[in-house]
Amino acid sequence: MLFVIHYKPKKADFINTATELDMQAVGGHFSYLQGLFTQGKLKLAGRRVDGDFGIAVLEGVDFAEAERILQNDPVIIAGVFQGTVGEFKIPLERLSTN
């Protein structure tokens, strides 16, 4: 089963209004996601170019663990982003031929 975390910055126009403390939290968020990727729990993560929102798709976890992952994310702890967790299905996927 897959779960998606939907991240949304609490500040409007986050890309242009982020403070140094906000960016430190974002750096911690990226490191946190890298750790989840290494553990095999993160399938993919990314954000809209304008910074309006980001997503992280988790695999091999249940809802309770996905919620814990969200609550332990540095950007959530710092109050920089808000987030929600939901079940995620991929009905269409292009597989790499490499």
Image: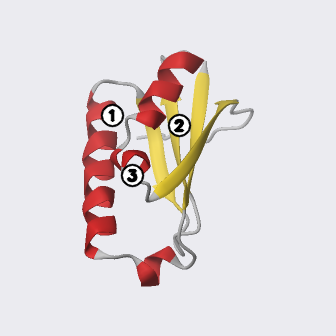
Q: Residues within 10 Å of mark 3 (few under 14, many from 20)?
A: many
Residue 46 on image: x %, y %: 47, 54
Instruction: Give the position of the C terminus as an image quadrant.
Output: top left
Q: Which residue is mark 2?
A: 57
Residue 59 on image: x %, y %: 50, 24
Q: Nearer the viewer, residue 87 or 80?
A: 80
Q: CA distance from mark 3 to mark 1?
A: 17 Å
Q: Which residue is mark 1?
A: 37
User: Which mark is in front, 3 or 1?
Assistant: 3
Q: Nearer the viewer, residue 49 or 85?
A: 85
Relative to 96, residue 60 above or below: above
Q: CA distance from mark 3 to mark 2?
A: 17 Å
Mark before the other along the chain sequence, 2 or 1: 1
Question: What type is the residue that disc 3 sits on?
Answer: Val
Q: Residues within 10 Å of mark 1 (few under 14, many from 20)?
A: some
Location of residue 85 by image quarter: top right
In the picture, measured across the screen, residue 28 lies left or right of residue 7, that is left
Q: Which residue is mark 3?
A: 75
Residue at horizontal 33 percent and vertical 46 percent from the top = 74
